[in-house]
Image: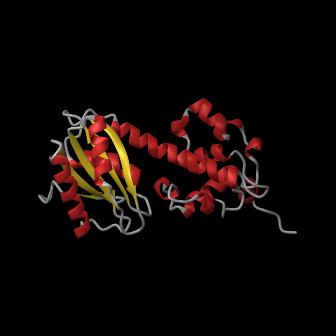
Amino acid sequence: MQEKSTTDVSSYISIKNWSEDDRPREKLMIKGRSVLSDAELIAILIGSGSRDESAVSLSKRILSQAENNLSELGKLSVKDLMKFKGIGEAKAVTIAAALELGRRRSSGETLSRKRITSSKDAYTILQPIIGELPHEEFWVLFLNNSNKVLRKEQVSKGGLTGTLVDVRMVMKMAIELSAVGMILGHNHPSGTLKPSQADKMLTTKLKTAAQSLDIQVLDHIIVTEKQYFSFADDGIL
């Protein structure tokens, strides 16, 4: 019978049998979380691998299918994750939940800025929320008179090519928050940055309604995964 090489055997060894310095949990406690690789952090989440594969090896395999990119990994659904041998529903849900917390943390840190001073500031807030979604969503950033964000609110969720927005509902929210400014934002899952005629018409409709209440629409941002389009910067607001 052909013997496995040392390299092959090591990949079959459970984390519990590794040296203490190589165990992800212990490594985090001793050296800190920043020294752990993405695969080691995911291994901590899933806890164990399978009979044939360690948790770290399994995590590396999952990451490789996501091009070793956490943003790409975050796009995988629970069902997608469960396609990997060794990942059941509980582990898949744990991974998905951890990545969602990371996304929300990024969004929350952005919101803590004192005020929005440019279209890029608005994009930085909106991108983690809607930049990678497979469907369209329409959000509004409600601002006070210092351009600080009072609230970010999803006002519509649509399909692959569009979304409907209730203008009256948006205005009601603005009044309840005592907002004096708004920044509109929605994503284009297709990746195109060019605003559609429907986008322009909706912007005009919201701007007109807001003006009647002495509220200013400062911008409308079209968000994709890596880029954005600003109505204000382009002079079409």
In the rendered structure, the answer to whether residue 96 lies left or right of residue 145 reads right
Query: Measuring 79% from the left and 62% from the top, which residue is drawn there?
Result: 4
Q: Is residue 189 left or right of residue 18?
A: left
The x and y percentages for residue 122 are 27, 47
Q: Residue at x 66, y 34 (%)?
A: 26
Q: Position of residue 98 (x, y in %)?
A: 56, 45
Q: Estimate the x, y position of residue 102 in percent, counting from the top left.
A: 48, 44
Residue at 56%, 63% (x, y): give it: 65
Q: Is residue 128 left or right of residue 142?
A: right
Q: Quadrant of the C terminus?
A: bottom left
Pinpoint residue 90: horizontal percent, then vertical percent.
Answer: 69, 50
Residue 78 vs residue 87, the one in the foreground: 78
**Viewer-proximal residue, 136 or 156?**
156
Residue 134 drawn above or below residue 178: below
Which picture quadrant has residue 88? bottom right
- Camera-nearest residue between 193 and 6: 193
Q: How many marks?
A: 0
Question: Could you tell me if residue 196 is visible in this image?
Answer: no
Q: How is the image coloured?
A: secondary structure
Tell me the quarter of the image containing the N terminus: bottom right
Residue 19 shows in the view: yes
Q: 131 or 63: which is nearer to us?
A: 131
Quick check: 147 above or below 92? Answer: above
| Direction right: furthest residue | 1
Q: Which residue sits furthest top?
A: 30
